[in-house]
């Protein structure tokens, strides 16, 4: 199990703690996490892999909007 500053991390406990936050605090946490360069790189790689896996064609913005709402 990973450690954070020599503390054992239990992801279900972290999830439970985040669930207890007020909505505005959850959004602030998400905003802070998504600013990290590593997150942005990992998210980009993840979405690229989904596109390949699902054979999603390249689309412009309006085509993508239609596709996502179908």
Image (cartoon, grey):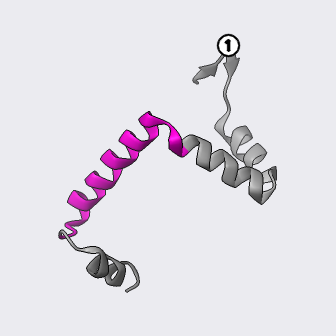
* Residue at 61% over, 49% down: 30
- Looking at this view, name the residue that lies furthest to the top: 6
* Residue at 60% over, 48% down: 31
Q: Which residue is mark 1?
A: 6
Magenta stretch prevailing secondary structure: helix
Q: Image quarter for residue 61?
A: bottom left
Determine if the magenta segment contains residue 49: yes
Q: Over which residues does the magenta segment extend?
A: 34-57
Using a 10 Å C-alpha cutoff, classify the residue at mark 1 as few (fewer than 14 neighbours), some (14 to 19) or many (20 or more): few
* Residue at 60% over, 42% down: 32
The answer to whether residue 44 is left or right of residue 60 is right
The answer to whether residue 70 is left or right of residue 25 is left
Q: Image quarter for residue 66?
A: bottom left
* Residue at 76% over, 50% down: 25
* Front-lying residue, 28 or 52: 28
Residue 38: horizontal and vertical position, in percent?
43, 34
* Quarter of the rendering occupied by the N terminus: top right
Residue 34: horizontal and vertical position, in percent?
52, 45
Residue 26 versus residue 11 in the image, above or below: below
Residue 36: horizontal and vertical position, in percent?
50, 36
* Quarter of the rendering occupied by the C terminus: bottom left
The residue tagged with tag 1: helix, strand or loop?
A: loop
Determine if the magenta segment contains residue 67: no
């Amino acid at each position: 199990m990973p450690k954070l500053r020599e503390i054992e991390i239990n992801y279900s406990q972290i999830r439970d703690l985040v669930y207890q936050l007020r909505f505005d605090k959850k959004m602030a946490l998400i905003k802070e996490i998504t600013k990290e360069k590593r997150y942005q790189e990992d998210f980009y790689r993840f979405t690229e892999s989904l596109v390949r896996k699902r054979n999603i064609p390249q689309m412009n913005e309006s085509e993508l909007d239609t596709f996502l709402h179908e």
